[in-house]
Image (cartoon, rainbow, N blue to C red):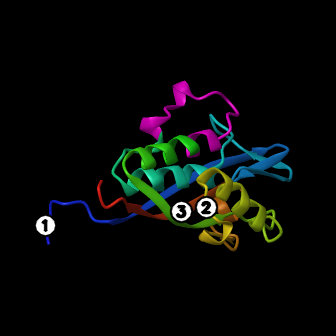
Amino acid sequence: MDMDAPMRYRIGFGTDLHRLRKGEGIRLGGMTIPCGLSCDADSDGDVLVHALVDALLGSLALGDIGERFPADKVRRGEDSRVFLAQARSLVLAAGARVINVDSVIHLEQPNLKNWKNGIRRSLAEVLDLPPANIGVKAKTAEGLGPIGEGLAVGAQAAVLVELDEDA
């Protein structure tokens, strides 16, 4: 096996964390979850999409979200799905395609049980994947740390991409 040749399958991992403040809803996976909180962020603060963008870029060593979408160029409240679509385009341009996504949202409140399928569909639309290829899990921090105290929301995402044989 040629150790200098790129592997056919690549995995990427991303994570994000934002402070919470009083607001009208938290943006997660392209959906606004109504509650008395929102994220303190330059864009819409969608930690799940931000983690997923980093995972996509990382899968092919294409940098990170801060390099591709620096805070000084992002408009307040900008829809993070724009970044996700651009990251997917970079993956496609590199001769790869997204196979599946798995993710975890860390949030004390509100409960996301009734929102996870909508989040999956929202991400699937941008990534051009069947929702069955996107895992979305939600975890609390059981009262521990900034997430458990309701001061922050976090997310982690992993992706599997496949390089075209000719890439």
Residue sitting at 29 percent across and 56 percent down?
166
Span highlighted in magenta in the image:
66-84
Mark sitting earlier along the chain (3/2): 2
At mark 1, the secondary structure is loop
Q: For the residues carrying marks 3 and 2, which lies nearer the camera in this image? A: 2
User: Does the magenta portion include 68?
Assistant: yes
Residue 32 percent across, percent down from the top left: 79, 50
At mark 3, the secondary structure is strand
Q: Name the kind of residue labelled 3 in the image.
A: Ala
Using the rendered view, name the quadrant where residue 80 is placed.
top right
- The label on residue 129 is 2
At mark 2, the secondary structure is loop
Using the rendered view, name the quadrant where residue 139 is placed.
bottom right
Towards the viewer: 44 or 152: 44
Mark sitting earlier along the chain (3/1): 1
In space, the residues marked 3 and 2 are separated at their CA atoms by 16 Å
Q: Would residue 157 appear left or right of 93 to someone viewing this image? A: right
Mark sitting earlier along the chain (2/1): 1
Using the rendered view, name the quadrant where residue 33 is placed.
bottom right
The answer to whether residue 12 is above or below residue 40 is below
